[in-house]
Amino acid sequence: MSEHPGLDHNAYAAFELLPDATVAVRGDGTIAYCNGLAARLLELRPEALEGRPAQQALPLVDEAGLDWWECVRPLDGDPHLVARIAEADVQLATPGCRRRPLVLTGARHGEHAVDLVVLSLRRGERRRRLDAARSELVSTVSHELRSPLTSVKGFTKTLLAKWERFSDAQKRQMLETVNEDADRVTRLLGELLDVSRIDAGRLQLRRQMVDLSEVVDKVLDRVGALGDDGLIRAELPELPKLYADPDKLGQVVTNLVENGLKYGEGTVRITADVDGEAVRVTVSDAGVGIEADHLARIFTKFFRRPGERRTGTGLGLYISRGIILAHGGRIWAESTPGEGSRFRFTLPLGGLELADVHAPPTRPESP
Ligand code: ADP
């Protein structure tokens, strides 16, 4: 290894401790040193890289497909004026290999001219996947918002322009559709807000000691009020109270019951029992069921079973999962295709200590 005057052997040895692939490039553009991770990334031994022109040995292209070395010119200019190389998404474009996404950062060193550039390279696949998931979210949301809004706009415009020409029954029907579509938009926006809170780990629970059967009764009132009563049966035994957020718990049960009614057939059953240190709630239906390879995926964002024709966003179970996990519980689904599904979740038994609130230590009694 030929050492750079500004960096001694210890400094190079320290590069080996870094968690990222690191390459040091001399002012003349040749590689002074690269750590083991960088050598592995470039699929060469470190000795084979040292002394080679960096632009050749480390061919990087930017997001527009242009040569990163030519665009950024990291070796030009005064290192005091611009000491850092801005973080960039680049691709390693080794000839004959698949391009690999990397996140690059760097620092420039030297007195008047650059005599050493240290580049740090981190794998960019995860960031790519996140970016792709984000744009998919934006496009799904736009799509989901557009159809109800188009109908709201269409019907209101028609009614305003031709009010006299419609019968009362026709006007009522159009207004009912507008009302339903406005509800759909509000529900979707509410769900998105929940999703963003869950993703950011900012879901706030207002916990109190809760009687599960009261929560279930409220859900039955609400869902029953939508005209589906009679198809839901709750059979809850005497249970200890739970330290939970009653509204959020109600949201989970509502979602599971509504899914049971929407995708199931026959009666939706709500049961519960104590399983060790937790209460286990089961919502079961006698519908088409869910194939084994979809069972885990139904809890992911926007997942809907292929060919699903009933309206929905694919966010309900993702939110339910977020709420149950925030309570320290578990949620899963079991199904025998053709015979129906069972959605189950657990909530730990206990009180304030579940929210990390502990009683202050008792003082020793004074004699
Ligand atoms: P949504 O109902 O809005 O699509 P969910 O996250 O609640 O969103 O459900 C995701 C998907 O899981 C549904 O689209 C449906 O395909 C499937 N699913 C949920 N519950 C059931 C059920 N009880 N029986 C069969 N499939 C279900």
Image (cartoon, rainbow, N blue to C red):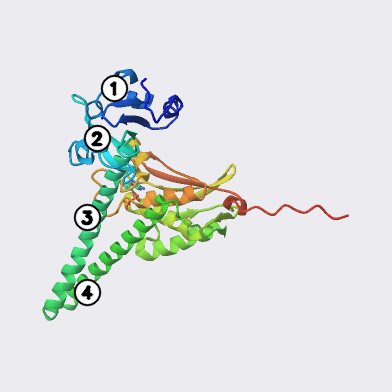
Q: On the rendered structure, is 22 left or right of 307?
A: right
Compared across the picture, whether 167 is left or right of 44 comes to: left
Q: Which amino acid type is marked by label 3?
A: His
Are dots 3 and 4 in contact, CB under 8 Å?
A: no
Viewer-nearest of discs 3 and 4? 3
Tag 3 or tag 1, which sits nearer the N-term? 1
Residue labelled with disc 1:
51
- The spot of residue 40 in percent (x, y) is 33, 23
Label count reads 4
**Could you tell me the amino acid type at mark 1?**
Gly
Q: Residues within 10 Å of mark 1 (few under 14, many from 20)?
A: some
Residue sitting at the far right: 367
Q: Find residue 249 and report its horizontal and vertical position in percent.
A: 48, 56
Q: CA distance from mark 4 to mark 2?
A: 58 Å
Q: Is residue 175 left or right of residue 282?
A: left
> In this figure, which residue is indicated by the disc labeled 3?
143
The mark nearer the N terminus, 1 or 4, is 1
Would you name the residue on which mark 4 appears? 172
Amino acid under disc 4: Arg
Q: Residue 321: where, in percent of width, then height?
A: 43, 48
Relative to the observer, which residue lies in front, 198 or 182? Answer: 198
Label 1 and label 2: CA atoms lie apart by: 22 Å
Element class at badge 3: helix
Q: Say what secondary structure mark 4 lies in.
A: helix
Residue hosting label 2 = 91
